[in-house]
């Protein structure tokens, strides 16, 4: 193998290490954010606050899904006091609740999964939505 190819492979290895490190750091920071959200819930009357973000994936199937198990709608969410996470909706329930005023927000807790309990794929999909969720929480508290 040429020196140039070895350098490219070494660089790729370093980038892979750095990406995994960043994922681990994101996991730790989101766990801390959820701890702070629980702290806010105790200090202010935010107990029933539910903030729904965008749909992250319209047909999400977890890695361990059984054959024939229907895909779910994965939606970013922030539920106080649980924190930042994902709501997994059945496709039919999602469509039905979208047609009802406040339907999604009212039923979100039933399908909510906090960040710490999400599969790695859901965690990765969730990260770009965190800022908007926190902004929504800030608007509710001001």
Image (spheres, rainbow, N blue to C red):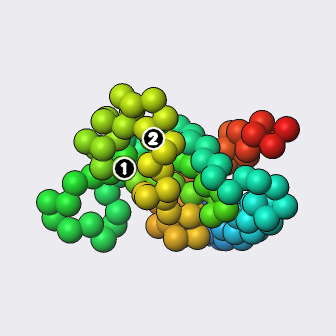
Apparent side of residue 96 relative to residue 44 in the rendered image (left or right): left
When asked about the image quadrant of residue 82, the answer is bottom right
Find out whether the residues at labels 1 and 2 contact each other: C-beta distance under 8 Å.
yes
Q: Residue at x 43, y 57 (%)?
A: 111
Residue 7 can be seen, yes or no = no
Q: Residue at x 53, y 37 (%)?
A: 54
- Residue 112: x %, y % from top left: 49, 58
Instruction: State the quadrant of the C terminus.
Output: top right
Side (left or right) of 125 relative to 99: right
SS at circle 1: strand
Q: Which residue is mark 1?
A: 89
Number of dots carrying numbers? 2
Residue 74 position within the rendered picture, expressed as x and y whole percent measured from the top left: 43, 49
Does residue 141 lie above or below 29 as drawn? above
Disc number placed over residue 21 in the picture, else none: none
Q: Residue at x 77, y 36 (%)?
A: 139
Residue at screen point 63% across, 52% down? 48
User: As rendered, which of 60 and 24 lies closer to the eye?
Assistant: 60
User: Is 127 displayed left or right of 96 in the figure?
Assistant: right
| Residue topped by disc 2 | 104
Label 2: how many residues lie within 10 Å, few (<14), some (14-19) or many (20+)?
A: many
Q: Nearer the viewer, residue 70 or 20?
A: 70
Please state the horizontal and vertical placement of residue 109, each as a whole percent of the image.
49, 56
Give the residue furthest to the left: 68
């Amino acid at each position: 193998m040429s020196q140039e190819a070895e350098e490219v492979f070494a660089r790729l290895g370093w980038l892979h290490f750095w990406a995994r490190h960043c994922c681990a750091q994101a996991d730790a920071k989101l766990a801390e954010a959820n701890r702070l959200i629980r702290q806010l819930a105790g200090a202010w009357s935010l107990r029933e606050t539910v903030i729904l973000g965008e749909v992250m994936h319209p047909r999400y199937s977890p890695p361990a899904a059984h054959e024939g198990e229907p895909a779910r709608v994965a939606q970013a969410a922030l539920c106080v006091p649980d924190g930042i996470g994902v709501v997994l909706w059945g496709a039919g329930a999602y469509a039905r609740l979208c047609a009802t005023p406040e339907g999604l927000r009212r039923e979100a807790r039933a399908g909510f999964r906090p960040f710490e309990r999400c599969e790695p794929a859901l965690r990765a999909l969730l990260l770009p939505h965190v800022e908007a969720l926190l902004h929504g929480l800030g608007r509710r508290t001001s």
